Amino acid sequence: MQLMLRDGSNGPFLTQVIAKAQAEQQLDAANLDLLKSKAVLMSLKFADKFYNKYKMHLLEQAANDIIGVVSLGLRELADNDLDKALAILLAPESIIKPFQKGWSMLSAVSKNQQAKSLYVDVQQSLLQNISTPPDAEDWMGWQHYQQAMREHLHAEARQLLHKQFFIRTSYDEYEHFGLEDVLAEIVFYRALTSGDKVKHDLKQRLRNITLQPHWFNTHYFAMQAESVFAEMPQNIADAIKADLGPHFIPALVRTLEFAKSYQALALNDASPEKLDALESQHGLSNPLLGWPQYLDL
């Protein structure tokens, strides 16, 4: 198993560490041979567990998997510092600790996977994206992990939002198009109902709500959003904030303006067809964030 064949300045993080250490004469032949022997042993064990260690192409695949997972864990443990990473590799646990860290990182972001995986607790496509030969000129494993982390946090956030802020706690992915939509419904509903848990009754309930003048501004809805963020774990709140577009709060104010028109029409005993027409007109021309078009069955 070769661990370093060329410069690799943009290649696997493990290769970057070894290349720098060799260039600066911080890694002698004995230590490099020790790293290689441990990597080979780990590859054999990995191939024996998930592939077939007697088939050369599968043994090579296992070696690439080890390099990818170790690179991921090593970069995290060393905070992307090549010198710190070398110290970790030269410690008694050597590449074992980075591999364990990388595998736990992949397992954590694979919790919401739907399909069965060859690697059980790690998403199969994710490991394939992390896996890399040692001489790869570019390694995008870290970027793939970051994207998987974002998707994982979004899924966790949607589930948490429903469990914490909705009367019906189960999440139906077909009811919303994204995390922003879920949050908007919570913020808008709570803003109009003094913090009640969300129930699919806003159209009917709006008839009995007095819309206050001070609600019709971005500051009010920004405060309502912050009150929601304050009730959830910091990492989930940060993930949601990073997903929000710049027009999130102004869109909620526009939806309140629509709600005012909808309320006036409803209080004048407008037919369901007229109410639906108003809703559809505004929803098509200016999407009503925070106002899902529920079917009244």
Image (cartoon, rainbow, N blue to C red):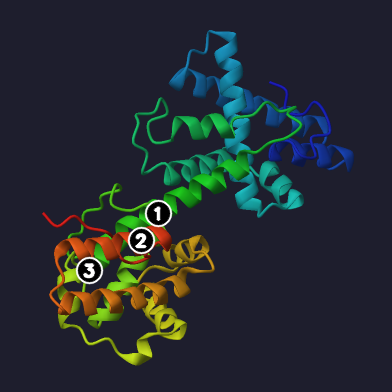
Which label belongs to residue 283?
2
Where is 280 relative to 26, above or below?
Answer: below
Judging depth in this view, the residue of 208 and 227 nearest the camera is: 208
What amino acid does circle 1 point to? Gly
Q: Position of residue 70 (x, y in %)?
A: 60, 37
Where is 173 relative to 45, above or below?
Answer: below
Quadrant in which residue 65 is drawn:
top right
Q: Position of residue 198 (x, y in %)?
A: 22, 68
The answer to whether 279 appears left or right of 72 in the picture is left
| Residue lying farthest to the right in this orientation | 24
Which label belongs to residue 198?
3
Q: Is residue 242 visible?
A: yes
What's the residue at 54%, 29% (across, down)?
A: 128
Mark 2 or mark 3, which is nearer the start of the sequence? 3
Quick one: SS at disc 1? loop
Q: Quadrant of the N terminus?
A: top right
Mark 1 or mark 2, which is nearer the start of the sequence? 1
Quadrant in which residue 217 is drawn:
bottom left
Quick one: SS at disc 2? helix
What's the residue at 83%, 29% (across, down)?
A: 6
Dots 2, 1 in contact, CB < 8 A? no
Mark 1 or mark 3, which is nearer the start of the sequence? 1
Judging depth in this view, the residue of 99 and 160 nearest the camera is: 160
Give the label, 2 or 1, closer to the camera. Answer: 2
Which label belongs to residue 178?
1
Q: Position of residue 226 (x, y in %)?
A: 42, 78
Quadrant in which residue 144 is drawn:
top right
Q: Position of residue 178 (x, y in %)?
A: 40, 54
Quick one: SS at disc 3? loop
